[in-house]
Image (spheres, rainbow, N blue to C red):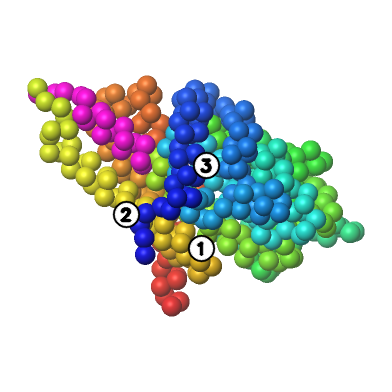
Amino acid sequence: MTFELDATHRSIRDTARAFARDRIAPQARAADAEERFPSELIPELGDLGFLGINIDPAYGGTGLDTLAYAIIVEEISRADGSMGLTVASHNGLGSSHIARFGSEDLRKRYLPRLATGEILGAWALTEPGSGSDSAALKTRAKREGQGWRLDGRKNFITQGSVGGVCVVLASTDLAKRHRGITAFAVEPGTPGFSAHKLTGKMGCRASDTAELVLDGVHLDDSQRVGDEGSGFIDAMGILDKGRISIAAMALGLGEAALEAAVGYAGERRQFGKAIGDFQAIQWMLADSRTELDAARLLIMRAAALADAAKPFGQEAAMAKLFASEAASRVCDRALQIHGGYGYLSDFPVERHVRDVRLTRIGEGTSEVQRMVIARGMLRR
Ligand SMILES: Cc1cc2nc3c(=O)[nH]c(=O)nc-3n(C[C@H](O)[C@H](O)[C@H](O)COP(=O)(O)OP(=O)(O)OC[C@H]3O[C@@H](n4cnc5c(N)ncnc54)[C@H](O)[C@@H]3O)c2cc1C
């Protein structure tokens, strides 16, 4: 057992950290304020191989392991939660679903372009009426000739209005509930398919989030991703790994907030001393450091199990649950240490507090993670 990164992972971390510091951090505040998706950064992320993490080199990807995936998302999130979410969801959801379950034809058609960032991947499970109970989705896919007709609505879809391909989960048989769900790759521009960008998000405001409308969308059967009726089971496997990346996103935001808090505690003087000399501040820093280290270890364990091809769903849920809740506490304490200045957007910690909130909701709420963990315990 080792708690240190090896040379390969240290090198990936250093590359991601430098790129995040030099290219992502400088634009983060303005993009957040303007709710602007920074599309100019996408080709650069592609050049670094950060958009083909879960794509095999045979299709132009980097085919990195889960630990590398977590490291990259953590480092990017340190600079900007919005870009962390973009990289996490593009790699972990849309691209992964096609890479793992798509036909050879679909892989050849989409993966090389997804890996370079020529197109971004989106993944649409959530609907206005079904979030945590995702198997209750109502989007219908009906057989029509050689293909399918899709009708329905999806909500909160990351990259929904900027993606070049969206994996849409739809029911081919409502009576079968989760066993009647099938995945389809839908391209923007397909007649009947439209995306409407959502604005006014609390955080991750530079990440693209959209509502999707499917109104009589005709698809060839070749656009089906995976077997008919296996879409939901495949999606749950996709979410298991995705949750490690959301945990890593939380960790990155927590690390950024703690670093800022330590710096501020050393500089800010009150009562003739640096505030870091007060025990109340020291305890906040100590609790934050301890909780982030615990989160990191849970993430590393889940990633190590995934990379060893062992079951890791419960461990991924624990990593996400703990990391997202711990990082939320860490960001909140960091704001408290900044006093009134932490409440101003001049200091990044205000943005971190808003961005980290998503990590307790996206890819399954904290309550859903607890359900996954407890179900696993009761099954064993
Ligand atoms: C910025 C953003 C990006 C997103 N990106 C995507 C995406 O790319 N693709 C996608 O498909 N979805 C995406 N989502 C959707 C996200 O996964 C859902 O919001 C989430 O799963 C919760 O669903 P809901 O919002 O409908 O809440 P609900 O399911 O309505 O939950 C409301 C509350 O009830 C609780 N609750 C529900 N059921 C139970 C239960 N059985 N026991 C205890 N408590 C329960 C929940 O935990 C929550 O606190 C995104 C969401 C956001 C905000």
Q: Is residue 76 left or right of residue 292?
A: right
Q: Which residue is mark 3?
A: 85
Quadrant of the snapshot with the C terminus:
bottom left
Residue 160 x, y percent position in the rendering? 65, 40
Name which residue lies at 9% across and 23% down: 271
Q: Which residue is mark 2?
A: 294
Q: Say the numbered circle drawn on residue 35.
A: none
CA distance for labels 3 and 1: 20 Å
Residue 2 x, y percent position in the rendering? 36, 60
Q: Quadrant of residue 260?
A: top left
Q: Nearer the viewer, residue 16 or 128?
A: 16
Give the dominant element type of the magenta stretch: helix, strand or loop. helix
- The answer as to whether callout 3 falls within 8 Å of ligand 1 is yes
Q: Which residue is mark 1?
A: 306
Residue 133 x, y percent position in the rendering? 55, 59
Name which residue lies at 42% across and 37% down: 78
Q: Quadrant of residue 279?
A: top left
Q: For the residue marked with disc 1, what is the amino acid?
A: Ala
CA distance for labels 2 and 3: 22 Å
Name which residue lies at 35% across and 25% down: 347
Nearer-N-terminus badge (2/3): 3
Q: For the residue marked with disc 3, what is the amino acid?
A: Leu
